[in-house]
Structure formats: C-alpha cells, structure tokens
Amino acid sequence: MIPVTKPYFPNREKLQKYIDGIYERQWLTNNGQLVQELTQRLEEYLGVENLLLVSNGTLALQIAYRALCVSDATPGAQPEAITTPFTFIATASSLKWDGVQPVFADIDPNTWCLNPANIEAAITPNTRAIVPVHVFGNACDVEAISAIAQKHNLKVIYDASHAFGVNYKGESLLKHGDAATLSFHATKLFHTGEGGAIIFKRKEDLERAKKMINFGITGPESIDELGINAKMNELQAAMGLCVLDEVEENLKAREAVWNHYEEALSPTLQLQAKPEALDYNYAYFPVVFESEEQAVRVGATLKENGVMARRYFYPSLESVACLGAEVDQPVSKEIASRILCLPIYSELTVESIDKITEFVIEGIHA
C-alpha cells in the first residue's frame, strides 16, 4: 500500500545519543536543554525571532489567541474571529473551544486561501481577529490582510501549520501577522512526533505566552496568569533536532516528487496557484478535478490499486454543525468537493509516482 504520507524518520543513532543525554541529565520537561537548543536552532533556520515551542499545533493556536487577547469577551457579547472554511478542523474548533465564534469568509478560487475581498463584509463589533491559513504552504495575500487588520484594529494570527520553511519575497512567511503558528505533527515536513510552535511579532506577547504554557506559574510560589500545560518535552525536542539536521535532504526529495507529479498532471488537472515570490516547501500535492463525481471515482480507483489519497480539506467547515456557522461559502464548498491530495513523502519512488498518475488518469476517463 502507498499511504498519502509517511513520517520522516531521522538517523536512529543520532537520536539515541540525544536520548542518552536525557538519561544522563534526568530532565524530561520544563524547558530542558534540548528544548532550548531546538528553539535557538529553529529561529536561526527559519529566520525568525520570538519562537515558542509547545506540545502540539492546536495548543499553539489556542495559546496565540489567549496571548493576543482574542478570547477576551465584552460583557454580553461573544468574541468573533474571521477565518477560512477551507482548512483542517483545528483552525476553527480551537477558536470555538476557547469561546470565540469562527466567522467564515470564502476563499480565492485559485490560491484556495482566505480571500481578502470577503473579509470586511464579515467584520462586526465583536470581531477580535482575522485567522487566515497558508493552505498547503501557499502564502495568503498578507499585504491585503494586514491593511484590513490595521484599518479595523484587529489582530492577525496565521495558521501556518503547512508553511514550515516557506519564504515570501525573500523573508520567512512566518514573520507576517501578530503571530503565526506551526504544527510539528509526525506527518509534517519538519516534525517532533507531536509538537508545535508560535512565532510572535512582539517580545512582550512571547513573554506572556511563556507563562501561559506552564499553568501561569512564574516562580515557586507565584502564579501570574491563567495558564495550561502546553510545554514541549525533551523527547519531542530530541526528535526535532535530528529531523532538523536532515530537513534539507528531506525537502529536496519531496521537491523531486512534487515536480514529477506536476509535469505529469498539470496539463490535465487544476493545481494551486502560487505567487511568483514564493519559495515553496512541497508539503502537499493537491489536485482539483472537474466534478465531485470525478474526484470520488479517482479516489476509489487509487484505493483499489493500493494507493491512499485524501479529500483534504473536506467538508468545507461552514457545513460542520458544531461550529455554529450559518452562511454557505460557495467557493470553498466547491473546491472541497473536488479535491484530492496525492501521496507525497521523501521515500516515494519515481516508479510509484508513475503508477499513481496512471491510476489518476484511468479514474478520470473511467
């Protein structure tokens, strides 16, 4: 079977050396040596400042909302945040979980990111923030979103879970917004098994968030913030340090897979449009078919031949009842119904890619 993705496993001997050090120091969590080292190395690699490691990508979002006061409620009014319906459920459910109503605005039909033209109509007196998503690692229109946020005095928190290592106009895409969050889940280009990070624009927001991820504790006998346990542990950091050592090799292998797919399928299928100034990370290979029927048929053909593709992101989130949305988002709904993500990981061979593309074409014409 060919899975839709596979975790990247780094050199085991190197990982063992890090684990031996953990045993020697007898320090497993609470800002240990490896967490500090990984923080520094990631800031250097990504070209960012004010990076905070956390235990997973969903908590990264929730801590960012809290640190930037998005979830602060006015008496008698529920806070709101404008976000995209074309994303993984955690983007919106983390808002809802934290008492913030997600308000969906539709996406651009070509980039599949939140369309700035749809944001202002969704703003109400209760709006606290805009939460766009760099979908599949593609850059949102960061300049337009920043202008809207400044005009209406709103925070911007980017869900950048897919955007590790992505540069835009020569700088890290993660520098945009008041905060940008990353997921280091096992299936990501860079991972720590489970884990995540927040990159803050301002140092003071980072310092507040540092307290929040450790129950609000600031000393042996002092608690200054309402907090939660969101700390990354030393075993996660050990994995991250090993994966980071090999991330360029992993990236090059994924780029080769992505380019092979593009050459074979771009004449036939709709691919995601990206700005020319984007330095991409080849995290996903999504394709959009002519109809939902065709997408489902291709998915079935692939599965029959031992290939797992994924309808990612499906369904469009305004249709998820527990999120409490009320307005259809037609572009998101249409793209979500016709999309498949094809397998992509560093070990995928040319022979496997050729078989997958053959099955895709077979499914289209079945």
Image (cartoon, helix red, strand yellow):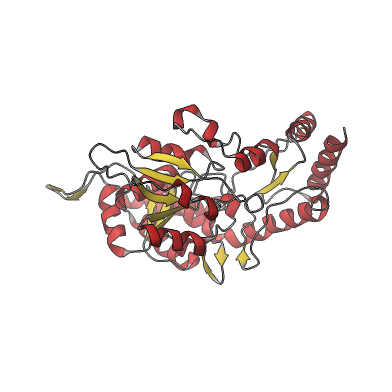
Q: Residue at x 39, y 51 (%)?
A: 129
Identify the image quadrant of residue 99. top left
Image-based side of 44 in relation to 349, left or right: left
Answer above or below: position of 101 versus 107: above
Residue 51 or residue 321, whichever sits in front: 321
| Image location (x, y in percent) of residue 351 | 82, 47
Q: Residue at x 69, y 40 (%)?
A: 339
Note whether residue 331 is visible.
yes
Residue at the farthest left position: 221
Give the side of residue 305 with respect to residue 185, left or right.
Answer: right
Residue shown at the point (65%, 59%) measured from the top left: 274
- Residue 189 shown left or right of residue 82 in the figure: right
Answer yes or no: is residue 23 visible: no
Nearer the observer, 293 or 350:
293
| Rendering coords of residue 280 (x, y %) | 62, 61
Give the percent coordinates (x, y) of residue 183: 48, 48
Specify whether 165 is left or right of 158. right
Q: Which residue is more in the foreground, 263 or 215?
A: 263
> In the figure, residue 55 lies in which quadrant?
top left
Q: Nearer the viewer, residue 110 or 10?
A: 110
Instruction: State the image coordinates of residue 61 (x, y, percent, origin top left).
Output: 40, 47
The N terminus lies in quadrant:
top right
Identify whether 212 is placed above or below 365: below
Residue 219, placed above or below residue 326: below
Q: Quadrant of the C terminus?
A: top right
- Against 40, residue 225 (above or below) is above
